[in-house]
Image (cartoon, rainbow, N blue to C red):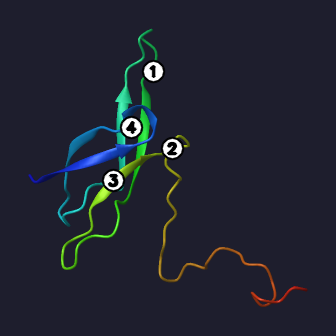
Amino acid sequence: MKSEETPFEGGPMDGRVLPVLLGITGHPPKTYRIPVPDPDGGPDAVLVYRRVPRGPGKVGLSNRWKYVYAPEGVPPRRLNWPWSKPDATPPGKPDDADG
């Protein structure tokens, strides 16, 4: 398996660089979860990091990634079928001030 040195920003892992396994597409996972054991023997806490682009890549090379701390966790996923209706939008034209 191929891995890539990926930096982490924010939260307890701020400033660390870890080797993250790449998927079949050559990208790291969209979210990275780190279980943290509770010292009192309670349930484990889970740190969640989201993948974001690291910055503009060099011409012709793939974009690199970094992980940013997400204290709110991962938002629930919604199915995105081609026939699904988009989220509700207010009536009227987008640039109409009166609605």
Compute the Cα span from label 3 to label 2: 17 Å
84 vs 49: above or below = below
Name the residue that disc number 2 marks: 73
- Is tag 2's residue or tag 4's residue first in the polypeptide sequence? 4
Q: Is residue 9 above or below residue 96?
A: above
Label whose residue precedes the other's in the sequence (3 or 4): 4
Left or right of 89, for residue 22: left
Question: Which residue does the image show at 19% across and 55% down from the upper left?
Answer: 22
Indicate the amino acid at tag 4. Asp
Label 1 crowding class (10 Å Cα cut-off): few <14, some 14-19, many 20+? few
Residue receiving disc 4: 14
Total tally of numbered discs in the picture: 4
Circle 3 or circle 1, nearest the eye: 3
Kindly check if marks 3 and 4 are in contact, taking CB atoms under 8 A apart as contact: no
Mark 3: which amino acid?
A: Lys
Q: Which residue is mark 1?
A: 43
